[in-house]
Image: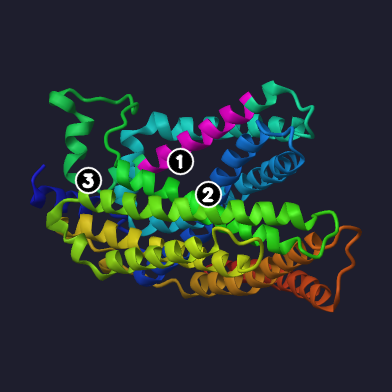
Amino acid sequence: MDVATTANLLQVLRDPTGVPSHPLIFQVLMVFTWIPHIVFVNLTLGSALLALVAFNRRNHPDWARLSEAMTKVAKVGVSLLVVLGVAPLLFTQTIYDPQWYASNVLSAAWVIGFIFTLIIGYLAWFTFYFKNHGEHAPNWAGWLGGFGLVMFLLDGFIMHVLAFQGLLPDQWASWFAPGGQVDMSGTGIHAWQAGRFGFYLAMSATVFGAFLMAYADYFAPRADRPAPYRAFVHQLGARVALAGALAQLGLLALWLLQVPASLGLWAHPMSWLLILYLGVLVALFWRLRASMTGAGYLVLALTVGMAALVAIFREVVRMAYLAPFSYDALDYKVIWDYPTFVMFLLTLLGVGGLMGGFIITTAYKAGRVSGVYEADVVVSRLATGSLASTIVWVVAFIGTGIWIWLRNN
């Protein structure tokens, strides 16, 4: 399709009912919520790979302990990345609905397969977790864990394909009807980008390496995590993070080279800001590569900051790809729905903030105690606040529904 036809198609495919608040709000929330999602994707892939590597070296006590710990991290990480992936997906569907749904239809078989491969992969990984205890764990468990990791990587690749295909609307017609013959199978993988997908895989090493350093510092108060083990993990984490940051720099360059030069991304400030930030991370990890302790929380925070820059850069790339077709998410039709908007904000800040703060604070403090954890005043107040906010939310939600019903009847 030519540019004008594609531009008209994108406008026709937009939801005619519009969005309930300004599109910029959805765009910001889409970027913001994608950050924790991708961080847990990175942690899951990194911990799963290291768990398998350590499993094959489990005759050494440090590697055996590390394999068990990282198997648990990956198990929890899968759950969190799925839950945290719901919000950015919903915001994407709201302001980029033509791109997302068209890509899903074109590769529908892979979209459906995503669910099954994720379930099968998680079951395989959970079995590996159940069997991975000590040096006498059966060898077949490692093969099962490897299969689970392959399924996770496949799911990541499917998401990459769906996102990238949505950026090429001028090619949708040729994919849907190659040679004039309509293909309704949905089995095609029509477009992917090695630099972009590889960048996210390398990002897993960077984020996970920083996580290992923070993991080593986090367990310092616990006697069952001796100093030699924590030093071993800390040093390993610094080296993994260094390798990941270096790989990210190279793959980011490849990604930018694979983007059409007409989009001008090489000249965009976000491209160079991300390159500079990665360069700083490389220098920092180089200095820390032989360290035995310290700076774990700092480098983890810096890698989360890097994930935030990647989230913004990802949106800059999307906007650049769609600009030639006159598609701007910010000019989406708006029909304000104030009650829903207010309810959303109160849910995010009230229930989400207090409940999330309670869960995170409790998990953080309990993990640093080797025995039974007794909640302090801060945790107790957070628990009370999260319960109260949930009750208020339920009353407000039901009350708003009743008020609207009575007003319209």
Q: The residue tagged with tag 3: helix, strand or loop?
A: loop
Q: Which residue is mark 3?
A: 168
Residue 41 tag number: 2
Q: CA distance from mark 1 to mark 2?
A: 9 Å
Q: CA distance from mark 3 to mark 2?
A: 25 Å
Give the residue displayed 60% in from the left and 74% down from the top: 349
> In the image, which is nearer the foreground, mark 3 or mark 1?
1
Identified by mark 1, the residue type is Gly
Identified by mark 2, the residue type is Val
Above-or-below relation of 110 to 286: above
Q: Is residue 19 magenta?
A: no
How is the rendered protein coloured?
rainbow
Identified by mark 3, the residue type is Leu
Q: Nearer the viewer, residue 124 or 28?
A: 124
Above-or-below relation of 51 to 396: above
Give the residue displayed 76% in from the left and 75% down from the top: 385
Instruction: Point out the tag, 3 or 2, that comes first from the N-terminus.
Output: 2
